[in-house]
Image (cartoon, grey):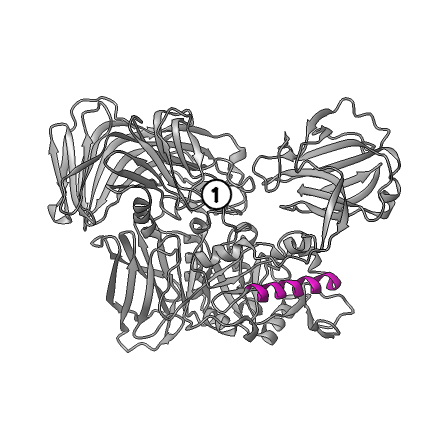
Amino acid sequence: MAPQAVSAVMVDTKAYDLACGVAVKATGKSLVMKWGTPEEATELTLNLSGRGALVRSISVTPHNGQSTVIVREVNPMTVLTVGQRDLRKRNGWTIFFDRTSRKPSESGPLVLKLKSVTVRSLGRRCMVDLGELAGESFSGKLRFTVYAGCDLIHLQSIVQTEKDARALLYHTGLTCDPVGKAVSWIGLDDQVHRAKADGQPAAPERVRHRTIALETEAGAVAVFPPPHRYFYPLDEAYNLGFTWRGNDFMKQVAGFGIGIRQDLEGDRRWVPWSNAPPKTQQELGIFWLPSTARGEKLFERVKAYTHGDRFVEVLGHKTFTSHYHIEHTTDLLNRPQNSSSVEVIPTSRQKGQSWRYTMARPPKDWMLPAFDDQTWKTGRGGFGKQGTPSLRQGTDWQTQDIWLRRAFVLKELPAGDLKLSLLYDEDTEVYLNGVLAFSVKGFSKTYREVPISAAARKTLKKGENLLAVHCWNDGGGQAIDAGLVRPVKINLPAPITKPEFVDVFKKAGVEIVHLAEFHNRLGRDRRIADKALPLLKLLHDECARLSDENFLLLPGEEPNVHLGGHWISFFPRPVMWVLNRAKDKPFVEMHPKYGRVYHVGSPADVLKLMEREGGLMWTAHPRIKSSTGFPDLYRHEPFFKSTHYLGGAWKAMPADLSQPRLGRRVLDLLDDTANWGSRKYIVGEVDIFQVDRTTEFYAHANINYLRLDHVPRFEDGWEPVLKALQEGAFFISTGEVLMPRFTIGGRQSGQTLKLKADGRAELAVNLTWTFPMSFAEVITGDGKKVYRQLIDLTQTGAFGKQTLKIPLNLKGKTWARLEAWDVAANGVISQPVWLE
C-alpha cells in the first residue's frame, strides 16, 4: 500500500488535542506519532512524500533504555475479495445459507493515492486518516489509531461501496525488504517456530492465537486480527491457516510480507463471508504490536489481550457454553469395540484405488455388471473436495452427483461377517453386482463400517465382482470412498477414550458444556423408540464418564420437532424421550430397561414434558438459518409464553464489519421480546461441529457467566445451571470484556425493580477489559419503543477496570439492560432488569 506520488499534502490537525496522550508532529514530508506504552514509549513515523514505503519506521523505547528502531520501510497492505450476496433467499442480509465461495468473485489490492491527511483525537487515542484508498469497487481511507498507554497500532482500511448485494473477505498485513529478517509464530504443537524471511512463495501458516511476527535484529512486530470480529460464522471451526508469509501474496502484492488471511472456500459447507451493504463503512482491521522482545516473550504480550485464549474466572460465576454438534456418541458407535478389521477390497484411505466414474447421469442399468462403462473416466479414490474430513483426495469432485464402478476379483468367498467401509458426504447408494447393498442419507466425517444387505451378500462369487456407488451432494464438504472389510476379533480390552474436545474446553476455561447431539444421521433414529433409547443412554453415560468435579459435560439436543424452526432442549438430569408419538403410545410409560420414557407428538406434549421434568427450551440461531421467522411466528403460543421457554441464542451471525458490536440480530430480538412483555433471555451459543486441538476454537466461541458458586456434580443433577438461565442470572461475553457486577437500583439482571414515583434509579457496573474500550450502552424499552443511551469510553486504555455509576430516568420503562464494547468489537452483554 505504498502511496502513489501526488502533489504536496497538507496535514489537517484542527481536530487534534495533545491532551489525548499522543504527541503528533508533522515535519517536512513525515508525520511522527509518539505515545507512552508498557515499554515506556513507541514512535511511529509515516512517510507523506508519496514515494517509498508508507511506514518509515517504528521505534520502541524500553524502560531506562535508548530508543530502538524495530523496523524500517514497511508498507501496510490489504487485498479485498468481493463476492455476490444472494438477497432473494429467506431474509435478505440476515443470511447464513449462502455459498458465496461458489459464485464469481474478484480479489485485488486496495491502493492508496495520498490526497489528504487528517489527524484527530478522541479521548485517550489519536487517529490519522489517509485518503484516498480504493480497489474492487470499494473506496475510503486508511486509518492508523494509537491508544495512550497501549502498545498496539491499530490499522483499518475503512471502505464502502455503492453496489448492492456484495459480500467480502479481506486479507491484510505488511510488506518489507526481507534481508536480515525472520518470521516467527506459535504452531499447533504450541511451540515457537522461526523461519528465515526469504523468497519462497506466500503460503498459509496454521498458528495459535491467530498471530505471526516479523523479527529484526532489534525486536519484532507481531500482527493479528480482532480475535472474533475477523471470523465470519461457519459450521466448522477449522484452523484454515489464518496467517501467511512469503512472496507475492495471492499474486496481488509484490515482494515479501506477512499477515492475516481468510480461506475463500471456508469449511467447504455454507460459506457466507461478511455482509457489505451499500454505503456502509466496512472496517478492515489488523493490530500491530511492536516490541524489543521476540519469540515467546513477544507472543505473551499478544496473548494477554485474549487471556491466552481463555475465559478467565469471575468471582461468583461459572462458565457455561452451549450448542455443539460434536457427535461424540456417533464416533463411539462407529469405533470398533474389541475388534479390528481387515480390508478385503481396499478403500483409498491409505492408497488411492482405481475407479471408473462419471458426473453425468448414466442409464438406469449403470450399476449392473453387464453395463459398458468404457466411456467413463478413470480416476483414483477418494473422490471429493480437498479439506473434507477424513478424505484422502485422489480425484476432485465438485458437481452434485457422481457415479462410480469398480471391478474386483475374489479368489475365495470371504468367510464370516463382511461389511462395507464407507466414507460419504452426502446421500449414498452402494451396489454389489447390481443389487443394493446399503443406502444412507446425510454424511459421515469418518469411515463407517456398515452392514451389507443379505441379498447383495449372496451375489458375491469367486472371480470378478462389481462394486458400484452413487453419491449426491448439496454443498459443503464432499467425499465418497468405499471398500469391503472383514471384522477380526482381538483380545485387547476396549479402550476408554478421552476425546480431545474435553481438554480443549478445559484449556479454554470452560467449566460447563451443553451439547446438541444427534444433528446428523442419528437424528432420524431419535424418532424410533427402539433406536432412540439406547442412543440417549449412551449419550448420558458418556457425559457422566467425561465429567469431573471441575468440569460438567451435559447432554442436550437440537431436536427441531413440533414447534417450528430449530430449537434446543435442556433438562436438569438425564431424561429418556422419543421425538415422536405413535398412535398407540401414551405420553409417558415405564420401560423395563430405561425407566420413565416420554413420547412427544405435538407442541403441547413438548411443553408438558418440560413442565414435568423442569426443562428449558429456546430458539437456536433465531431469525436466521432454519429458524428464519422464529420465534416471532410462535410468540403467541402457550409453549413460548411458558417460563420453560428461555428465549433465543446469541451468536455473531451474520458478519458485518461496519457494525461496532457483534450479533445485532439477537440483541434486537432480546429487545423485541422484552417489549412484547415476555420475560425472555438470550444465551450465548457457539453452534459448531468438530472441536479438537487443531481447531480455531476461541475465535468462534463466546461464553456465558452464570451466577453460580460451584460446578454441580453430574450424579447430583444440574438444576442450578437451568435455574441461573431461567432467572436471567448471567451475562454473555466474548472473553475480553467482563462485568463481574451489574445492578440497576440494586437489582441484578433477571430481577425486578419497583421504581420510585419519579422513575429515577442508578445503574452500577464493574467493567474489566483488555483492548481499549469504545463505548457502553444502556438499552431500555417501554413496551413499544427501544431507547439507547451511549456512554463514551474513549478515555480508557488497555487492561483496565472501572466502576460506572449512571443515573437513569426510567419512568414509563418496563426493562433495561447494558452492553459494553471495545475497539476490536469484543463485548459483554447483560440480561434485562425488569421494571415495575
For the magenta stretch, what is the residue range? 528-546
User: Is residue 263 shown above or below 550?
Assistant: above
Q: Residues within 10 Å of mark 1 (few under 14, many from 20)?
A: many
Q: Position of residue 284 (x, y in %)?
A: 35, 39
**In this orientation, which residue lies closer to the viewer: 753 or 484?**
484
Dominant secondary structure (helix, strand or loop) of the stretch shown in magenta? helix
Q: Position of residue 648 (x, y in %)?
A: 49, 61
- Reply yes or no: does residue 326 show up in magenta: no
Residue 282 in view (yes/no):
no
| Residue at the spot 49% in from the left edge and 49% down from the top edge | 693
- Reply yes or no: does residue 539 show up in magenta: yes
Residue 502 in view (yes/no):
yes
Q: Is residue 16 left or right of residue 678?
A: left
**In this orientation, which residue lies closer to the viewer: 728 or 761?**
728
Q: Give the quarter of the image for residue 196.
A: top left
- Which residue is most to the front? 491
**In this orientation, which residue lies closer to the viewer: 813 or 120?**
120
| Type of amino acid at the residue the image marks with label 1 | Asn
Q: Is residue 664 left or right of residue 798?
A: right
Query: In the picture, which quadrant includes the N terminus?
Result: top left
Query: In the picture, which quadrant includes the C terminus?
Result: bottom left
User: Is residue 806 shown above or below 284?
Assistant: below
Q: Position of residue 156 (x, y in %)?
A: 30, 39
Q: Identify the element where label 1 is drawn.
A: loop
Q: Position of residue 313 (x, y in %)?
A: 37, 64
Q: Which residue is mark 1?
A: 239
| Residue at the spot 66% in from the left edge and 38% down from the top edge | 349
Q: Is residue 609 left or right of residue 692?
A: right
